[in-house]
């Protein structure tokens, strides 16, 4: 397993004050922004993803090209400044996965109830190595964007992985499912949860085998917050051939 060092305090401060080049292609001088128009066009979505046993699943785009590079930079290389840009890609995915369909976000949506975003949990050791939980950070960037689009949103971190969880890299679908079954648990104490008409969405970065989504849904149902669907940055369920 490759170990990734957490960003230094100086690097984190530099990212905050002076965002670096485009996370997808590297274009632009430092401070030009995290996502260029060309990469935005390349990742136009959203797309429905078939994950048996996981309900309705929508990804922002395929796990390839600029989006793949941006996800890796954000997740493994300390590009925390990319969180708002990646969160923006998820807004159309949320609109597509909600019961109201593509028109579910925006001023035209009738009776905009609050949506609750549940981040898929990270292994504690991985979160420490990355300088924090990257999916939780993504949800916290997504919530205000949804609210600004006319859909009030809040983050609900109610899932956790304990120390028994192994790194999923290299595990097949069966091994991933077994790994999660023994390590996934509810997190935190009592808190205000969603109302009867407030949808809950599971949020993750990449779907590969669907094991994480299938494992999280029944746990959410058991604790009284069943998910209406899942949204992801990238779909890696079907390998995309290089062109």
Image (cartoon, rainbow, N blue to C red):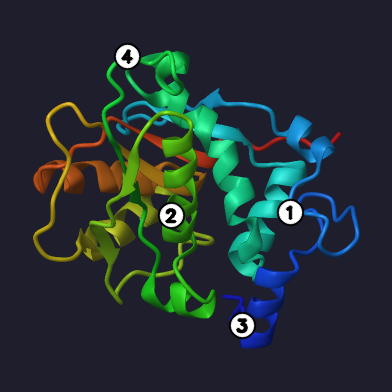
Labels 2, 4: front one: 4
Which residue is pictured at 36% across the width and 23% down the height? Answer: 98
**Marker disc for residue 5:** 3
Q: CA distance from mark 2 to mark 3?
A: 23 Å
Check whether the beta carbons of the residues at disc 2 and disc 3 lie within 8 A of each other. no
Check whether the beta carbons of the residues at disc 3 and disc 4 lie within 8 A of each other. no
Answer few, some or many: residues within 10 Å of disc 3's Cα (few below 14, many 20 plus, some between 14 and 19). few
* Residue at mark 1: 34
- When the figure is inspected, residue 109 is found, relative to residue 43, above or below; the finding is above
* Residue at mark 4: 110
**Residue 90 position within the rendered picture, expressed as x and y whole percent measured from the top left:** 53, 37
Q: How many marks?
A: 4
**Residue 5 position within the rendered picture, expressed as x and y whole percent measured from the top left:** 61, 82
Nearer to us in this view, 6 or 210: 6
Answer few, some or many: residues within 10 Å of disc 1's Cα (few below 14, many 20 plus, some between 14 and 19). many
Left or right of 171 on screen, residue 61: right
Q: CA distance from mark 1 to mark 3?
A: 21 Å
Answer few, some or many: residues within 10 Å of disc 4's Cα (few below 14, many 20 plus, some between 14 and 19). few
**Residue 162 position within the rendered picture, expressed as x and y whole percent measured from the top left:** 27, 72
Q: CA distance from mark 1 to mark 2?
A: 17 Å
Labels 1, 3: front one: 1
Q: CA distance from mark 3 to mark 4?
A: 46 Å
């Amino acid at each position: 397993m490759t170990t990734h060092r957490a960003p230094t305090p100086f690097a984190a401060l530099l990212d905050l004050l002076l965002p670096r080049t485009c996370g997808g292609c590297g274009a632009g001088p430092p401070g030009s922004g995290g996502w260029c128009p060309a990469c935005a066009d390349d990742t136009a979505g959203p797309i429905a993803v078939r994950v048996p046993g996981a309900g309705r699943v929508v990804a922002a785009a395929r796990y390839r090209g600029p989006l793949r590079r941006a996800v890796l930079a954000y997740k493994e290389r300390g590009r925390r400044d990319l969180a708002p840009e990646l969160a923006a890609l998820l807004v159309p995915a949320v609109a597509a996965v909600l019961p109201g369909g593509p028109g579910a976000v925006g001023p035209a949506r009738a009776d905009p109830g609050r949506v609750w975003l549940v981040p898929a949990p990270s292994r504690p050791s991985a979160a420490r190595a990355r300088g924090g939980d990257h999916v939780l950070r993504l949800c916290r960037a997504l919530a205000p964007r949804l609210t600004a689009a006319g859909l009030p949103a809040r983050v609900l971190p109610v899932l956790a992985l304990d120390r028994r969880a192994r790194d999923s890299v290299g595990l097949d679908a069966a091994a991933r499912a077994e790994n999660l079954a023994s390590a996934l648990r509810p997190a935190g104490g009592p808190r205000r949860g969603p109302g009867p008409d407030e949808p809950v969405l599971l949020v993750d970065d990449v779907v590969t085998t669907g094991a994480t989504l299938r494992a999280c849904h029944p746990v959410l149902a058991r604790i009284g917050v069943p998910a209406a669907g899942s949204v992801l940055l990238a779909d890696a369920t079907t390998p995309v051939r290089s062109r």
